[in-house]
Image: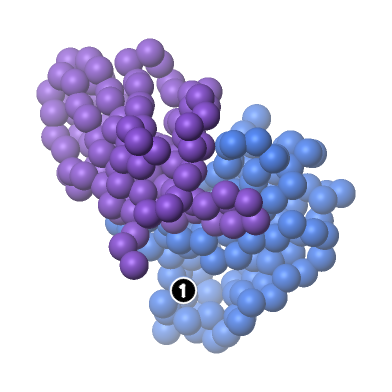
Amino acid sequence: GAGVSQSPSNKVTEKGKDVELRCDPISGHTALYWYRQSLGQGLEFLIYFQGNSAPDKSGLPSDRFSAERTGGSVSTLTIQRTQQEDSAVYLCASSETGVYADTQYFGPGTRLTVL
Amino acid sequence: QKEVEQNSGPLSVPEGAIASLNCTYSDRVSQSFFWYRQYSGKSPELIMSIYSNGDKEDGRFTAQLNKASQYVSLLIRDSQPSDSATYLCASRSGGNQFYFGTGTSLTVIP
């Protein structure tokens, strides 16, 4: 079946512009995560959605970052007034709940470059 | 202090040898531990999860967990060039967050 998809695969923007990154999780997966991976770094947790519950936003680095998940499926990560330090690969992952909740399936990522 | 620490490497082993990857974690209440493999330019993929002290084997891979010492390791037997990748260790304490290490780069030399 289809895996997690993300778009765009690459995004180059100018400092100060807003960007939107999209994630389509695996159908039926209720949990959705956003991570950021900078060069040579591990994955940094950003935000977590679980069904219709309030998202866990504890990993968002600043108020320039926000995310929403519509209809419990597609999610959009928005970065306002982008800065050069926002350049990274943004990864989305989804998982089921219950005993399979620990198995995350990652999308291919969006490589964001802020000039 | 980072939640999960790994030696960034690079680690090089000859083909057919055992590769040993290590990870330590700081949160004593962490319950679940994972090893992901990430090929260059690709996204991580889960290869092993471990929840209890001791060893867990899956094919050529063995994960080892020692909660008293707060370390997790991954052994890859009969290493193949296709095992060359970055290996990420991760933990979860029961909440929503997974904590990832920075990864260890492994190169298997033919």
Q: Nearer the viewer, residue A112 or B14?
A: A112
- The residue furthest right is B68
**Residue designated by label 1:** B83
Dividing the picture into quarters, in which one does residue A74 lie? top left
Q: Nearer the viewer, residue B39 or A74?
A: A74
Q: Position of residue B6 (x, y in %)?
A: 60, 49
Chain given the colour purple: A
Q: Is residue B104 visible?
A: no
Amino acid bearing label 1: Asp
Quadrant holding the N terminus of chain A: bottom left
Q: Is residue A109 left or right of residue B63?
A: left
Around disc 1, counting alpha carbons within 10 Å, would you say few (fewer than 14), some (14 to 19), or many (20 or more)? some
Dividing the picture into quarters, in which one does residue A22 lie? top left
Q: Nearer the viewer, residue B95 or A88?
A: B95
On what subunit does the disc labeled 1 rest? B
Q: Residue at x 59, y 57 (%)?
A: A100
Q: Residue at x 35, y 36 (%)?
A: A71
Q: Residue at x 22, y 15 (%)?
A: A81
Q: Position of residue B2 (x, y in %)?
A: 62, 34
Q: Residue at x 47, y 81 (%)?
A: B80
A83 relative to B38, above or below: above
A60 relative to A87, above or below: above
Q: Position of residue A63 (x, y in %)?
A: 38, 13
Chain given the colour blue: B
The secondary structure type at the circle numbered 1 is helix
